Amino acid sequence: MKRLLVLVLVLAMAAFIFGEKVTIIANAIKGGKNTQVVDWFEKYIPEIEKELGIDIELIQTGIRDEDFKARIVLDIKGGGGADILWIDGFWVPEFVEAGYLRPIDDILAEIPAWKYYYDSMKAMGSYKGKTYLIPASTDVRMIYYNKELFKKAGIPIPWQPRSWEDIIKTARIIKEKLPGVIPIQLNAGTEMGEATTMQGFFMVLLGAGGNLYDWETGKWIIKSSALRDTLNFYKRIYVDEKLGDAALQVSAGAREKTFELFRQEKIAMYVEGTWFYTSVLNPNNPSWGFPDRDERIGWAAMPGRGKPGDPEFVSISGGTGFAVNINCKNPKLVAEVLKRLLYIEPQLSYFEMKPFVSPRSDLADSCWTVNKDKFIAETSRALVKYTTFRPAFPVYPEISFQAQLLTERVVTGQMSVDKAIEEFAKEVTRIVGKENVIEKP
Amino acid sequence: MPALFGVDRVRKSLMGKKVVVLLLIPALALIFIFLILPGLWVLKIGMTNETLTGAKARNPDFVGFENYAKVLSDRFFYNALRVTLLFVLGSAIVGQAGLGLSLALLTYRKRKLRSFVQSVVILAWIIPEVVVAYLWIAFLDKDYGTLNMLLSVLGLRKVNWFYEYPLPTIITFNIWRGTAYSMLLFSAALETIPPSYLETADVIGVSAWRKFKDIIFPNIKSYILTDLILITLWTFNVFTPYLLTGGGPSFRTELLSIYIYRTAFRYFKLGYGASIATIALLINFALAMFYLSLSRRKKA
């Protein structure tokens, strides 16, 4: 009897060690950040495990994006890491240059759904002629507002600002009528990381007709009137008129703190992406969700600066997706798992749990899920035509950090706008070299 | 150095030189693998432009002392150095050693009081760091912190401690956290003073200050130096304030250790981070040398 037990134990351990296994890592944790992603995996993983006769492990994290990135990088550099990496699309170039991702063109040949992906989305996942990422979803950016607070302050809704001046005027009314409420959250500073660059800095800069990168000459823009106006807009909000909370921007865990304050209805306007509405504020999010989100939270397109020739509205898009670790031992199995995750049924379910702009036409055309979500349908229709992508070159994260630093120095009053731009120009020039920078009028 | 004499005697009587060397090999091997090798590796990385992502992750170039030149003109480095020096001065030298000595003296020859104070102080020392960090955030938070609740009950203004007084906050935190060690060391040192010295002084009616200056201080001088060496080096390399402030707001609590971490593991500049680490190592080395030379001079 004893001997039999030992034998069974040994066999079980052997099965555990030698049994085939696919691991997936995502920056999601049950009950917290991207909780819907975990729910979705839990719904579909058991089926796939049974069908393929393998183990699939989901590694949950739910941490700051920068820390998630560091974890993945260190895992891979150390020779390990999960097989399937659910990562941000703009990390692809620097990861590929470092040799961390496996080209997946052979895997894609096994995945029937690949033909439905939009070309722009395929482009986000490819680098130097090879494909590395299957986009999971994409997004747009806008300005959210709390309708209850607006009503209390006597601001008519629906609200749609036409210029930066309109935003300032509205913020002033809120400051005057609702003491204790932060009128606007426009991300600034290095603590918020990429969320500052994408949700804050770019949304303002694009509205003045500016950019960080000049696509015509292929050079990084170190000085422009658009950049100066962008920082002056930040300065007006955080320093001159105190319509936002500068201390909050640079405090530890700033981003989560702003989510919390928005949930407590202590922030009236917040410039953010699709994710904010469909994941953070989603009624199914136990941390920050609003049960009556659809009635309580409104959105408006982010207006341009308001000078002649400026864009009417702006948006910028990013997206996440599935990449495959270079250390992956069993790409065939990974292909089988991905193929099943990308079947239409699980995908429709995913977009139901966490509505997003779909990267593929078969989902977008399906009249019963993606378009059923009013928010996604409306924001896509209104904003996709204005949206653009960030210059995701391998050097981009360094430039992005300099942009975050730029806003931090201005909103905390450490430097004047001119001085901060001088520093920015100097640092960017040092990073990419004199021949790769340009000054614009 | 009595310990060395002991070894000397053993060597003469029991074993030959070879045996001693043989016995030392395991220890030396461990030191080599876990201390010297990583140290050399950091030196090597510090002379490259290696990064964690991008092309330089795969093919880093040897850049010699370029990183070091860059560090010396890096405003974040000087900021971190300044913050670290203030932190060491405030929390280790003045705070932990000063407070530890005061507590030891106050409870000297008062057994009950001493065991009570020691238990309380040691409690702060033995709680895991993450728990401690959480407790301090709960205590100092701007909106929900216990301290601000108390202040507002008293009708005072709520203070955003981490924003308005970031450096004093982490200094206070570290004094609270680490005083136990100094206090224990000084309490033990005080026990070594023969009671008759102080009893005689009591009979003559000497003032407290004279007792400290002429009896206590000369007797515990070498312990004070040991304490200063250890806590200076520990505090110089401490990382826990990161859990409270993340180095912010706006780098105002960015200790050298946090700056190295940020450079290497948040912005992925491994080579550059390693060169800053090497400089930090040299500073540690210089500090240790300084203290050792003090203790030698005292003995001579």
Image: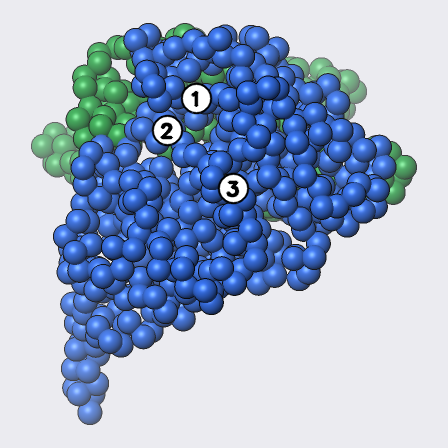
Q: Chain of mark 3?
A: A
Q: Colour of chain A?
A: blue
Task: Give the residue displayed 46% in from the left and 28% down from the top.
Answer: B258
Q: Amino acid at mark 1?
A: Leu
Task: Give the residue displayed 84% in from the left and 42% down from the top.
Answer: A154
As drawn, the label of residue A212 is 1
Q: Amino acid at mark 3?
A: Leu
Q: Which residue is mark 3?
A: A383
* Marks 1/2: CA–CA distance: 8 Å
Check the image and name the residue furthest to the front: A308
Instruction: Using the rendered image of the protein, determine whether residue B115 is visible from the camera's viewpoint.
Output: no
Labels 2 and 3 touching (C-beta < 8 A): no
**A164 lies above or below A116:** above
Identify the image's colour scheme: rainbow, by chain, secondary structure or one colour.
Answer: by chain
* Marks 1/3: CA–CA distance: 21 Å
**A230 lies above or below A433:** below
Q: Amino acid at mark 2?
A: Pro
B286 or B214, nearer to the observer: B286
State which tag comes first along the sequence, 2 or 3.
3
As drawn, the label of residue A391 is 2
Task: Give the residue displayed 51% in from the left and 26% down from the top.
Answer: A206
